[in-house]
Image: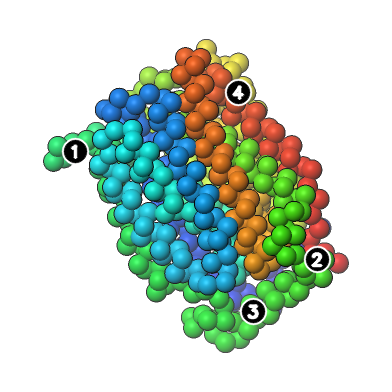
Amino acid sequence: MVTTSVSRLPEVGLRARRRVALRLLPFLFLIYVVNYIDRVNVSFANLRMSADLGFSDRVYGLGIGVFYLSYILFEIPGAIAVERWSARRWIARIMVSWGLITILTGFVRNAEQFYAARFLLGLAESSFFPGMIVYLTHWFRLRERSQAIACLYAAVPAASLIGSPVAGWLLGVRWHWLEGWRWLFIFEGIPAIVLGLITLVYLTDWPAQARWLPEDEREWLSNELRSELDAKKKIKNYTILEAFLDRRVAMLTAAWFLSLTGTLGSIYWIPTFVKRLSGLSDRSVTSLLLLPALLGIIGMMLNAWHSDRTGERRWHTALPLFASGVMFELVLVAHHAVPLAILLLLLGSGIFYAFYPVFWSIPTMMLSESAAAATFGLINSFGQCGGFAGPFVIGLLNDTTHSLNASFAFIGLAYLVAGAFTLTLRVRNPLET
């Protein structure tokens, strides 16, 4: 097994590692927080929106899913643009456009406008996430990549920590004849525009272009990343087509699709799940959702740290999925004991976050350059189809069965099968001798 020991790094490596992390990770974390708040704020808005506009669960679920139909269109070309053109320009373009569309979502009046707003938001945000993963490979070595991805992905539960109380407050207001859920979209779209403009001047595409790094640190980091690239090419230098046809990429894609089917089904519906199970107020529901967010941040950081330390990836990916799947299936047994059912639901909704950063470190062990960028886009584009399937199927199950139990079983099964797929992977670490 490969271990990551900071003490083994030369002094210049320690300086470069620290400077890059402090410069990039807080800002990337911030823009991903804003991204995820803007993407899932509709789940909080729905505590009032569907009632105000007369939407059924099926209409809401389809509206959520429409986002992902357009989201997948530019995943692959967008990720390649980050690799071959400019990460900062592409990310800035995405942020400004999604901020504008989020604001416009606050003015929808019917189902057709809701569908259109979600479709346009998906187009605007397309390739943001795979582009961020590609960008991290430009700056962080394989030995610490899971931890870097964990710092980025911590933004997902952190978005709930920030978004939940803000949503709980805004849902209770009514200003200038606009309902609170409309202000939720308006206020949360503005930071994306501002940060998109800042991205143009703050981010740097490659270490060799980083004037904020001393020359010796630039050279050390560039040489380290070049050595890793050469090591991966010695195992196999993939073309984009060869990467797409690799069995392991197919298994990663299937696992990502299933995990996102459960994850996004859970994320977009959990405020509604908790409210219907408990009968609590909107503000109490949003407060309870702080628990899975906190659990998710802790789980991601610990799991990524331990995975980087041991060099083991498969079980660190699969175990959080298995644990979450079991929690959701247990809700079926405990649904008559409401406090226990809600606890299991919240735990299951928090534990799964731990699999994210380790999962995305697996393809970076196999691939590099344009093949890696295109494959990140491929995996994420097919996986994001789960963002359509999960919320839509849950809405359909709720309307058809007039119960939440089928939805809980569906989410749990998706997690369990995704975990099983990850255990079939066999990926050689290029740094092992």
Helix, strand or loop at mark 2: loop
- Marked residue nearer the N-terminal end (4 or 3): 3
| Residue at which label 2 appears | 236
The residue carrying mark 1 is: 178
Q: Earlier in the sequence, mark 1 or mark 2?
A: 1
Q: CA distance from mark 3 to mark 1?
A: 52 Å
Residue at image point 51% right, 63% down? 25
Q: Alpha carbon of mark 2 to alpha carbon of mark 3: how far?
A: 21 Å
Look at 66% across and 50% down and name the residue there: 359
Q: Which residue is mark 4?
A: 409
Q: Which residue is mark 3?
A: 222
Residue visible at 46% across and 69% down?
A: 88
Amino acid under disc 3: Ser
Q: Position of residue 347 (x, y in %)?
A: 55, 32
Decide which of tag 2 and tag 3 comes sooner along the chain: 3
Q: Nearer the viewer, residue 401 or 293?
A: 401
Specify few, some or many for label 4: CA neighbours under 10 Å numbering under 14, 14-19, or 20 or more.
some
Q: Residues within 10 Å of mark 1 (few under 14, many from 20)?
A: few
- Disc 1 versus disc 2: nearer the observer: 2
Disc tally is: 4
The nearer-to-camera label among 3 and 1 is 1
Q: Quadrant of the N terminus?
A: bottom right
